[in-house]
Image (cartoon, grey):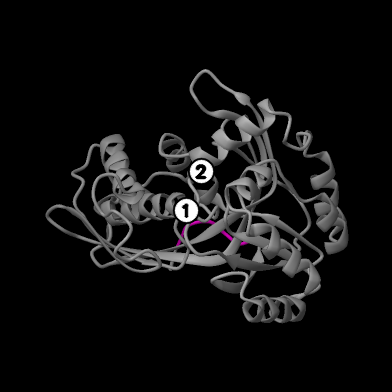
Amino acid sequence: MTEAWRPDDDDDQQRRGASGPVRVRVPAKVNLHLGVGPLRRDGYHELNTVYHAISIYDELTARRGDTLTLTMEGEGAGELALDDTNLAIRAAHALAGYAGVPPHARLHLRKQIPLAGGLAGGSADAAAALVACDALWGTGLSRDELAGIAADLGSDVPFLIHGGTALGTGRGEAVSPVLARPTSWHWVVAIADGGLSTPAAYAELDRLRDAGAAGPPLGSTDGLFAALRQRDPRVLAAALGNDLQDAALAMRPSLAGTLKAGEAAGALAGIVSGSGPTCVFLATNADDAERIAAELATAGVCRQARTAHGPVAGARIG
């Protein structure tokens, strides 16, 4: 007599985990709106932001191992610490602790998202490690459970578990998807030489505000949401904003020339991404994005100019 299939059979297989390598691709993020509120008791600022995942990716591969190790290639090789201070390693430890499994894996990172560039590269790698190790170890957690673990690792990490376009509140870790008709937006990403410290950028914004030298706070995200619903890049361009841009420009004055060059090349709008120093430019379409990127590269105002589109999915196996 043949034994009947039971739903638990698939669960048992999932709990056993993957026998071979697990590859996860995870995107960078930009902030279409980054409103920075007052400093909280926990040392973070209250945020009201709209996250947007774009098609610049890191890839993390997880294999079975007797210990937890991390190797890497690409952007930041030789600069990025690969020990327990690395967010990917911290994410693997956090998942193992939550699930009650040994933190054993060999992780390898192929990095394209620049370090300290305002694109959440470290947070992306933490999200990738959570998704990859969940599959490798067969812990079988939902995306929401992984996002809960991610919230303790960094403000941007929960968003990069999900991707797309989303509202971030609290210190950015409370994420709600933005429901809008599917639209692909086209971007030019101008990558600067060197990075900027995110804590230093927030401290500089506080200093500028205390001195009365910062622009008015952005306030509500309503205008940004309305622009997304209209699906018109010119309308979206007028709604983009970043309270940290004043701080980034004060710390890296050359970024003003990058923003000016992008708009002179025909971008609909340009803003500093997150805490900088990466600048992102909204283009009318893919062809315009390619042309603007070429002009920025020729102008010598950035280390590299790449095109990207969004929104895209968050950390995914494949």
Left or right of residue 174, residue 224 in this image: right
- The residue carrying mark 1 is 116
Mark 1 and 2 residues: CB-CB less than 8 Å, in contact? yes
Q: Nearer the viewer, residue 191 or 238?
A: 191
Task: In the rendered view, tell whether residue 248 sits above or below residue 189.
Answer: above
SS assignment at label 2: helix
Residue 209 can be seen, yes or no: yes
Q: Position of residue 234 (x, y in %)?
A: 87, 62
Q: Report the label total.
A: 2
Residue at point 47%, 53% (across, down): 116
Disc number placed over residue 198 in the picture, else none: 2
Of the residues shown, which amino acid type is indicated by label 1?
Answer: Ala
Task: In the rendered view, tell whether residue 141 sits above or below residue 183.
Answer: above
Q: Position of residue 58 (x, y in %)?
A: 44, 64
Q: Position of residue 133 (x, y in %)?
A: 31, 53
Quadrant assignment for the C terminus: bottom left
Quadrant assignment for the N terminus: bottom left
Residue at point 55%, 33% (across, down): 203
Residue at point 53%, 28% (across, down): 44
Of the residues shown, which amino acid type is indicated by label 2?
Answer: Thr
Disc number placed over residue 233 in the picture, else none: none
Please identify the quarter of the rendering in which residue 270 is found.
Answer: bottom right
Q: Nearer the viewer, residue 298 or 309?
A: 298
Residue at point 48%, 21% (across, down): 42
- Going from N to C along the chain, the mark reached first, 1 or 2, is 1
Q: Magenta stretch?
A: 311-316
User: Circle 1: is it few (<14), some (14-19), or many (20+) Cα within 10 Å?
Assistant: some
Q: Position of residue 197 (x, y in %)?
A: 48, 46
